[in-house]
Image (cartoon, rainbow, N blue to C red):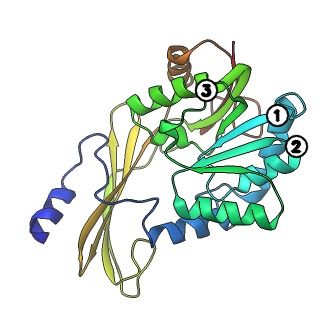
Amino acid sequence: MDLNKQLLKFMQRPQLYEPSSNKFWNDEHISKGMLEAHLNKDWEAATRKYDFVINSVEWISRIAPPSLKNKLLDLGCGPGIYAELFKRKGYDVTGVDFSERSINYAIESAKKENLNIAYICQDYLKLDLEGKFDVITLIYCDFGVLSDTNRRLLLKKIYLMLKPDGILIFDVFTPLMHKDKKEYKNWSYFGNGGFWSEKSHGLLESFYRYENNIILSQSIVLTDDGVECYNIWERMFTCDEILSELKIAGNWDIELYSNVIGEKYSEDSKVLCFVARKK
């Protein structure tokens, strides 16, 4: 397709859940920046700040003690930050992530630390590990990046992967997260490269709102080689919406918190954490 036509196509408002034009998690350049973001302990980007992560693991180990709930699956494990802490708490840990760079880092880190952690580089929507886990975690609101169809598929898979009385722990953003954020389009130029490309490039960043509290953060990247479009979708949820989706997947006993360190649920929270125990 002609470059101008391709750019004009990308600049139109995307259809709901329209995919990116290029791989994101496994792009050779972008994945380097993502790994750096994961590993920066003071930066709340790809992973929450390290102090929060430590408190999160402490809380999870209290509500699901590894002496009783030993088999743990960390979905979207990235470079293994949570996984290593879970292992040190005494869990038998399996980590799954789609990013080859992150998984390779996690494997090498576990070897250096002499930690026996099983890592799988795979789309977790394609997992087939029925009845194997006592605890499954999906942390930092990854649930909201999935389409309606994929969320239902994932919850059904999780229900099957959990043992009886197994626990799912996950968090989501509420509509308060981006309450006052307006739609926009911003142009930038990076003469020495940047996050999206190591080459000089122009960048059009757009923010769109859709029905049902769905938002899109779009990045259109122009280089001498062409143009690529990256669409990062995110849905925010009310408590009732998540309860409804869980009900479709199976039967649960559910506890609600304001975050993944166990703070009491508040209607003012920008995050909701669900602890769902399989009946």
From the image, tell me which residue sits under label 2: 90
- Asked if disc 1 and disc 3 are in contact, CB closer than 8 Å, the reply is no
Q: CA distance from mark 1 to mark 3?
A: 16 Å
Q: Verify CB contact (< 8 Å) between mark 2 and mark 1.
A: yes
- Please give the residue where the numbered disc 1 appears in the rendered image: 70
Q: CA distance from mark 3 to mark 2?
A: 22 Å
> Depth check: 141 or 1 in front?
1
Q: Residue 202 sits in which quadrant?
A: bottom left
Q: Position of residue 64 (x, y in %)?
A: 82, 30
Count the labels in the image.
3
Mark 3 belongs to which amino acid?
Answer: Glu
Relative to 265, is 177 above or below? below
Classify the position of the N terminus by image quarter.
bottom left
Q: Amino acid at mark 1?
A: Asn
The residue at 50%/31% (across/down) is: 154
Residue 152 lies, in percent from the top left, at: 46, 26
Identify which residue is drawn at 28% across, 57% down.
21
What amino acid is labelled 2 in the image? Answer: Gly
The answer to the question of whether label 3 and label 2 lie on touching residues, with beta carbons closer than 8 A, is no
For label 1, the crowd category at 10 Å Cα-Cα, with few meaning under 14, some 14 to 19 and many 20 or more, is: some
Q: Along the horizontal axis of the image, is 270 left or right of 229?
A: right
Q: Nearer the viewer, mark 1 or mark 3?
A: 3
Disc on the earlier residue, 3 or 2: 2
Q: Residue at x 67, y 60 (%)?
A: 106
Of callouts 2 and 1, the N-terminal one: 1
Res. 74 visible in picture: yes
Examine the rendered structure and indicate whether residue 72 appears above or below residue 134: below
Q: Is residue 158 above or below residue 13?
A: above
Tell me the number on the disc at residue 130: 3
